[in-house]
Amino acid sequence: MHGDERRQLVRDFLARHKLGAISTVNPDGSPEAAIIQVTLGEDLNIVFDSLPGSRKLANIERDSRIAMVIGWDENVTVQIEGLARPAKADEEQRLRDVHIANCPLEAEFLKQGAQLFTILPGWIRYSDFRGEPIVFELAGGDL
């Protein structure tokens, strides 16, 4: 399996999943983790939202590095390391619409002032252990 096929396999997997575990960095360097609803954005970017006052939001505003895992059922996962950034003004409505269409429950959180974010992956590992293992990484130009 080559680059385009790998990207498509990851993309298809991410498009089917709506929950992920995200880890951020607390001020003292310790990890903070949370379950979030996720939406596949453009390329292999991930869209999510966070309410003001959450540890996750405070951590991302201070240090944008994140790690996350999506999947875990059926022995298939995607691990992502990258940066989280607030949605840009010119993309916010489009991302909001896509995220609500994928995760309708998030509409209420967005009405309450939740902020939209995009995760820009720097490294991805796909692992499928349902049979003969399929494990590969994407980074740099492969993304």
Image: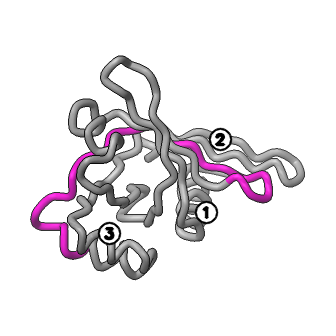
Q: CA distance from mark 3 to mark 1?
A: 25 Å
Along the line of sight, the residue nearer the viewer: 138 or 128:
128
Q: How many callouts does the rendering have?
A: 3
Residue 136: assigned label: 2
Residue at the outermost top position: 28
Is residue 127 inside the magenta stretch?
A: no
Is residue 80 magenta-colored?
Answer: yes
From this view, report whether residue 100 is shown above or below residue 30: below
Instruction: Indicate the secondary structure of the residue bearing disc 1.
Output: helix
Q: Which residues are magenta?
A: 72-95
- Residue type for callout 3: Phe
Residue at 38% over, 72% down? 106
Residue visible at 26% across and 39% down? 58
Q: Which mark sits nearer the N-terminus, 3 or 1?
A: 1
Tell us which disc is closer to us: 2 or 3.
Answer: 3
Nearest the camera: 14 or 31?
A: 31
Residue 81 or 10: which is nearer the viewer?
A: 81
74 or 143, which lies in front? Answer: 74
* Crowding near the residue tagged with mark 3, few <14, some 14–19, many ≥20 C-alpha atoms within 10 Å: some
